[in-house]
Image: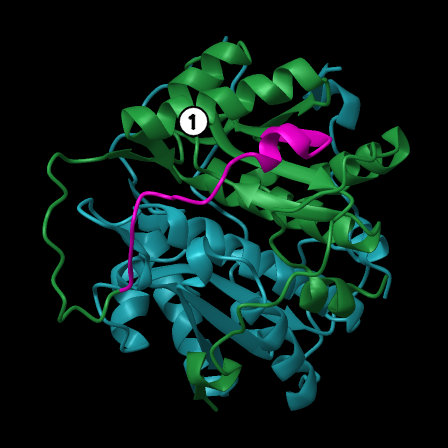
Chain colours: A cyan, B green
């Protein structure tokens, strides 16, 4: 598939067919991830591929437990649901969102979940300075974007899922606490269509010094 | 260009031809960036496109000033060169790197530099909780990866450049201090070939629960 077509047609999917994904397709997606750029080619990532039903059900259970507890790590930010829910400034132009109330049941149905694990330790150190703190996050995000585009080219739907509890999922997947689960990438044949939520006009995001 | 070919053949380039880049190609690259995924479609990014020679020379000057001062923000981490340079543990298996000593002169030659500016304020807030702290970084990284792949498909070379001083470049580009310059993306027709630094075998990065 043409790269621009993949970029434009990729959608976040939450409805999947239970049809298994061919192992060759999974490998192509992982290979695409590994070709992402990273600071000084440090490749600060690992991938845990979850295809068995019991483990996928467990990830669903853990997400529901996290929802119930009101704790979830969103993009590295530990969210704790306050009690009672704080009042929302109605005047605010900032978009607000409740703790996610959409069903997580697709985690039980989607045939492949890939935990993308960032390796802060793998990062390049600058001589005499500490580690580069955020480089692994940017690199993992580039790897994930490669995965989503590769999935699109292989006629698979995908979701960059982050509503999970870092500690619970880390323990279940036996991931060293020094590592950081950046996302659970869901992959499967899509069920139904997905509409684009649209974008601001690109030009509204651009300023030119020419 | 096929998406897998773009992913596999993209290289970090530091040698560019001074031939200008067609405005239509720049627009296609920006459009690709805008189609990246972001938390709840918050699109937390802006782009400053620098094509005029005086501004590109100034960015070069600012990078050299930052090198001279020994301050640079690398992926959101403020690096300060210590005096004297701390001893390096020779036994360490971690890769260490001196403050970058390669020439930044390509900043004067590359015809297009796009400052990718992250918008922490644009992020979705969870009701009653603070902003999602890191989401804009992941989204900007996905947008940058789209840009690099689009450039590759358009026969352009690219570089995800981060060795700059956040404050100096922010002041020069008149960027609100509440925003965060995630990268300077260099774009131009490549001069010469670029070898891949290679990758670890993909399978060495993968664990399977199947």
Q: Is residue A205 visible?
A: yes
**x, y percent for residue A106:** 58, 67
The part of the chain drawn in magenta is B95-115
Front residue of A90 and B137 = B137
Mark 1 — residue?
B64
Which quarter of the image is occupied by the C terminus of chain A? top right
The residue at the point 14 percent across, 43 percent down is: B85
Residue at 64%, 89% in the rendered image: A23
In the rendered image, the quadrant that contains the N terminus of chain A is bottom right
- Mark 1 residue crowding within 10 angstroms, few (<14) / some (14–19) / many (20+): some
Residues B205 and A128: in front is A128
Q: Is residue B110 magenta?
A: yes
In which quadrant of the rendered view does residue B152 lie?
A: bottom right
Residue A162 in sight: no
**In the rendered structure, the residue with mark 1 lies on which chain?**
B
From this view, report whether residue B163 is shown above or below residue B153.
above
The spot of residue A54 in percent (x, y) is 43, 86
Residue B148 percent location from the top left of the image:
68, 49
Q: Which residue is at 34% across, 47% downward?
A: A76
Horizontal relation, residue A163 to residue A23: left or right: left
Specify the quadrant of the image occupied by residue B50. top right
Label 1 secondary element:
helix
The residue lying toward the viewer, choosing from A141 and B182, is B182
Q: Where does residue A148 sit, x and y in percent of width and height?
A: 66, 61
Q: Residue at x 63, y 16 (%)?
A: B55
Q: Is residue B149 above or below residue A45?
A: above
Q: Is residue A145 magenta?
A: no
Q: Depth check: B46 or B126 in front? A: B46
Q: In the shown orientation, is residue B160 left or right of residue A83?
A: right
């Amino acid at each position: 598939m043409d790269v621009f077509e993949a970029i434009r047609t990729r959608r976040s999917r939450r409805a999947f067919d239970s049809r298994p994904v061919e192992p060759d397709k999974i490998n192509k997606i992982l290979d695409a991830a590994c070709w992402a750029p990273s600071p000084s080619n440090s490749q600060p990532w690992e991938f845990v591929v979850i295809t068995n039903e019991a483990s996928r059900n467990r990830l669903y259970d853990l997400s529901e437990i996290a929802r119930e507890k009101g704790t979830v790590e969103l993009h590295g930010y530990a969210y704790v649901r306050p009690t009672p829910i704080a009042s929302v400034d109605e005047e605010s132009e900032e978009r607000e969102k409740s703790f996610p109330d959409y069903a997580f049941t697709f985690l039980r149905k989607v045939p492949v979940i890939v935990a993308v694990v960032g390796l802060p330790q793998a990062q390049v150190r600058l001589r005499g300075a500490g580690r580069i703190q955020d480089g692994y996050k940017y690199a993992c995000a580039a790897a994930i974007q490669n995965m989503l585009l590769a999935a699109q080219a292989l006629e698979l739907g995908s979701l960059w899922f982050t509503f999970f509890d870092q500690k619970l999922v880390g323990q279940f997947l036996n991931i060293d606490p020094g590592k950081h689960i950046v996302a659970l990438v869901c992959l499967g044949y899509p069920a139904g269509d997905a509409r684009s939520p649209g974008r601001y006009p690109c030009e509204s995001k651009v300023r030119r010094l020419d």
